[in-house]
Each structure stands twice: as C-alpha cells, then as structure tokens.
Image (cartoon, rainbow, N blue to C red):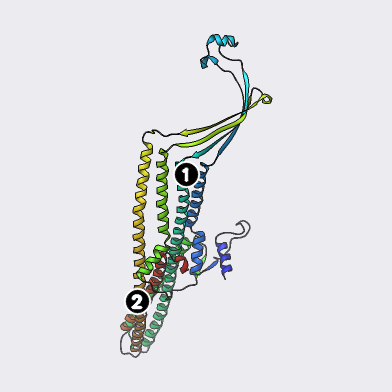
Amino acid sequence: MKWRTMGVALLVLGIGPSAEAVEPPQFRPELRLSLHDAIQAAIDNNVNVRLLRERIASAQATADTSLGTLLPSVSGYMTGRNQTVNLAAFGIPQSSLSTLGVPGGVTQPFDVYDARANFVQNLFSLSLIQRWRAARAGVDVAKLEAEVTKRDVMATAGLLYMEAVRAEAAVKARQADLELSERLLKLARDRKKAGVATGLDVTREEVQLENTRQRLLVAQNDQESAKLNLIRALGIDFNVDVTLTDELTLAKIEPKTPDMALSAAHENRVELKAQMSRQKLASLSLSSVTSERLPSLSLNGDYGWIGLKPDEASATRTVGLMLSVPIFDGGQRESRISENRSRVRQESIRMKDVSDQITLEVRSALLTLDSSTQQITVAEKGLELALKEFSLAHDRFAAGLATNIEVTNAQASVARARDNLIEALFRFNASRINLARATGEIDQLF
C-alpha cells in the first residue's frame, strides 16, 4: 500500500512521461492519504521547507567564503608589452640623460616580458577569525530554523488533515439527517392518507427535509474546501481526488502535568536552540567588528621571470610581511560596533519572549486537551439522550398522540448532538497535535 501511495504521489507531482508522449487522462487519479502520509508529503514538498533547505546551502557557502579569507590566496599573470619611459619624470638631471644617450629624456621603445605568481596569506587577523566563526554559527541558525519550519509544517498539515476529516464527518452526519428526514416525511404522508395527520404535518416535514438538504450542500462544499487547503499545504497537484483513510477518534494518551510538559518543551523545542544560536551569532558578529581595532599581520610575496626577451628573462622574487594598524576610519567602525551591540541586546530580549511563548503554548494546549476530553464524554451522552428523545417523539407521533412538532424538535436535537460530538472529537485531536508541537514532540506523534 505504501509503495502504491508513493507511485500515485509521483504521478500527481508530474514525474513521469512528458505531456506530449501520452494523452491526458480522462479521470482524476485517486490519492489515498493517511495522517502519516500527509505529514510526510508536507515535509517533502512544502515550499517553506524547500526554501529553508536552500537557505542552509546559502549559509554554508557564506561560511566557506569566510574561511577562504583565512587561507592562502594565489594568483598569477603573464604580460608582454612594448613601452617607452620618460626618465626625466623620475628626477634624473638633463646632463645625466645626455650622458646616457637620452637627450630628450624619453627612451627608445623596448619590450618587457613578465610572468609572475603572487600570493597572500593572512597570518593573524582576529576580526577575520571571528567573522568565520560567526558564519559557521549562521549555518547552525539556518539548520535550526529549517527544523522549526519543518515541525511547523508537520503540525499545520496535521491540523488541516483533521479539519478535512471533520468536514467529512459533517457530511456523513448531514446524510444521516437527510435519511431521517426522508423517513419522517414518508411517515407523515402515510398518516395523512390514513386520516390521522394533517397537511401541516406533511408540509412541516417537507420544510425540514429541504433545510437538511441545504445543510448537506454546505457541508459538502466545506469538505471540498478543506481538501483543497490540505492539498495546498502538502504541495501536491490539485488535479487529484483525495481520499482520507483516518477518522476522528478518541485516542489514548498519557496524561502530563504542566511541569512535565514544560520540562519536555524546554528540552525539545528547537526554537530555544535556534534562539541561543542567534545570540551566539550576534555575539560573534560584535566580536568580529570590535576586533577590527587590533593590528593584523599578513605575508605577501611573488615569484616570476622578467626580461627584455622571453629567452633572456631572469627569475626574481619578493617576500615581505605587512603589519596593518587601523587608526581612524571616520567613526564607521564605532557605529558598526554600536549597531551589533544593539543586535546582541535584541536577541537577549527575544530569548525571554520565545521562552514565554513556549510556556503559553504548552499550558494552552493542556487546557484545550483536558476540556475537549470532557466535552467528548458530554457530547456522547448528549447524542444518546437526543436519540432517545427522538425515538419517544417518533413513537408518540406514530401512535397519533402528538403532532410532528415534537419529532422535528427532536430531530434538530439529534443533528445538534452529532455536531457537538464531531466538534469535540476534532478539538481533542487538534489539541493532541498542538500539545505535541508545544512540547517539541511532534515528530514522535506521527
């Protein structure tokens, strides 16, 4: 089944023969989706997840660039030129120029050939070292942000799947209501023919039937809209019939106290790790700019051949150390230091906000989970009582002891009770997903 689902997914994503090679299908392919399949498809195809993967690659390239500034830089060139030189421009006296046979100061044209390799090696620059470390921290931030996005997408896809399942359950409930209305209308017509019911009873049931049909149409539209939202979140082709294989159920869960849930959240939530990495990145960026105040040392050199003719060229070289001491740059460095200090403070403030947000999400999910669990018990009891009320009202109407007003009221109570149960089951399953996301255990839930 799993391989068949993957095959259908490949078809949906357009991986296969080109459109020119085969005729377009005359049917919409069916894609059977369990909750687990939907989560996996979202991870593989969601646009945000794919964009964050590219951001990791970009951050890694930035780190490699920073590392390159610490490694040797080697370049080479080869030139051949014909030139003249104005020796007088170098301060050589006219008398000396005449002695050299250059009375006008400008030499005769001559050729120069030069082939040379240059290299530069930074021996010490704390600023460049810190910049490289900051770039590596940027890669860690990108990876953690990608993981955060992945878990958000998993939770979103799970919630959208549950919404689609809820819409499907609502359609089934409306179909059951419609069948009930059709039975009651037939009963009212039969009793009118027998002379024990009025035309008002029949009309009342006809109105109830049309109202139920209207609600069914609305439920069917909501179902299709929910499936479209799910397809969009999964990043698959819209031209597919999605069949959901899971249903709203009351799953068994292990109870958690707020302290247990908060402890798990602080241990597992990637947002906290990502924020800590952002703080480290901000600190290293500040250190990199601050270190620009310090001198830096580099080794420079070249080696090559130069001469008037290629076959007469001689080897020459240059080797030297360069100590660079920053003195004054118009205050630009101090401004960048102040800017980066502000970023460090901002990240510290955000850390507190992230921690408070996680606490809020955990406590809210626990409250909703506990409430929805109780609501399911109440809704099940309410549906049981509504069905009993309807049975009694139906029997009274069939026996001629009452009009069908009691029946239509009881019928409305049954529809309401069904909706209450569907909503309670949805809230329970949604709160399970939200709690798993809040505690950082969303990958374990699916």
Q: Are marks 2 and 1 in contact (CB under 8 Å)?
A: no
Q: Quadrant of residue 101?
A: top right
**Residue 121, position as x, y percentages in the image:** 53, 38
Determine which of the numbered discs, if any, sits on residue 434 in the image: none
- Vertical order, 89 against 374 (above or below): above
Q: Residue at x 47, y 68 (%)?
A: 444
Give the mark, 2 or 1, whose residue is nearer the N terminus: 1
Q: Position of residue 403 (x, y in %)?
A: 31, 85
Amino acid type at image mark 1: Ile
Q: Within 10 Å of the Cα at label 1, are there few (<14), some (14-19), or many (20+) other Cα atoms?
A: some
How far apart marks 2 and 1 lie (CA) works out to 59 Å
Which residue has dot 2 on it?
374
Q: Residues within 10 Å of mark 2 (few under 14, many from 20)?
A: few
Q: Secondary structure at mark 1?
A: helix
Looking at the picture, how far across and down is residue 8, in whole percent?
57, 65
Disc 1 target residue? 129
Q: Is residue 147 left or right of residue 202?
A: right
* Secondary structure category for the residue under label 2: helix
Q: Quadrant of residue 316?
A: top right
Residue 265 in view = yes
Of the pair 191 and 109, the residue shown nearer to us: 109
Q: Which quadrant is the N terminus positioned in?
A: bottom right
Tell me if residue 119 comes above or below residue 132 in the rendering.
above
| x 47%, y 44%: residue | 129
- Identified at 51% across, 39% down, the residue is 123
112, above or below 412, in the image: above
Residue 162 % position (x, y): 43, 69
Can residue 207 be seen by looking at this rendering? Answer: no
Q: Nearer the viewer, residue 419 or 200?
A: 419
Nearer to us: label 2 or label 1: 1
